[in-house]
């Protein structure tokens, strides 16, 4: 129920602990006029704006389906794969470390282009050996592969 102290808005961006982009929310005038609207986080929920937002959300869902399909393909290709990285070491301890960027570059050298942000490492690898590494593409798409670090 709308009254004099509330308004309906459409969120243009995700607002933490409040809602996702495209949600239609009823908010107090103060919150709407003083925070959401000036920050560009929302717009008035006119019938035309609601229809436009629904079309935009449908388009995003379609794009997301394509992206998730690409992620699943990459994950299937990466699953169980092994990549070898040579690094200078002494007594099995590396001079430096191997992080997500180095792993992504090694994968690229084998013909797989995986963005480093998808590679999950708790901390950089600093010793010679074989390590299980996970790539998390989001949307419940993950793959586990091995990184073999050899002394140069």
Image: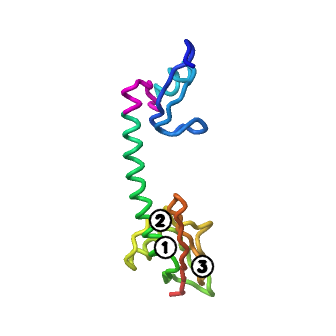
Q: Residue at x 59, y 74 (%)?
A: 125
> Where is residue 72 drawn, in percent x and y?
46, 66
Q: Within the image, what quadrant is residue 146 found in?
A: bottom right
Q: Secondary structure at mark 1?
A: helix
Q: Which residue is mark 1?
A: 103
Tell me, yes or no, if residue 85 can be seen here: no
| Mark 2 neighbour density, 10 Å: few (under 14) some (14–19) many (20 or more) | some
Q: Which mark is residue 121?
A: none
Residue 130 can be seen, yes or no? yes
Mark 2 or mark 1: name the one nearer the start of the chain: 1
Res. 57 image quadrant: top left
Give the residue at mark 2.
116
- Point out the image quarter for the N terminus: top right
| Alpha-carbon span between mark 2 and mark 3 | 17 Å
Determine whether the residue tagged by mark 2 lies in a helix, strand or loop: helix
Real-space CA distance between mark 2 and mark 1, rounded to the nearest whole angstrom: 8 Å
Q: Relative to 134, does residue 27 appear above or below in the rendering?
A: above
| Residue named by callout 3 | 131
Residue interval drawn in magenta:
40-51
């Amino acid at each position: 129920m709308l009254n004099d102290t509330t308004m309906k808005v459409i969120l243009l961006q995700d607002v933490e602990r409040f809602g996702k982009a495209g949600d239609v929310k009823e908010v107090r005038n103060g919150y709407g006029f003083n925070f959401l609207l000036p920050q560009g986080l929302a717009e008035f929920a006119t019938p035309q704006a609601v229809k436009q937002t629904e079309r935009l959300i449908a388009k995003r869902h379609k794009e997301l389906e394509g992206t998730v399909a690409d992620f699943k393909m990459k994950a299937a290709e990466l699953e169980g794969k092994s990549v070898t990285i040579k690094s200078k070491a002494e007594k099995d301890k590396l001079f430096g470390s191997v992080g997500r960027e180095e792993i992504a570059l090694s994968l690229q050298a084998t013909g797989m282009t995986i963005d480093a942000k998808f590679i999950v490492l708790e901390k950089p690898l600093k010793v010679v050996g074989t390590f299980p590494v996970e790539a998390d593409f989001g949307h419940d798409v993950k793959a586990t592969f091995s990184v073999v670090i050899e002394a140069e």
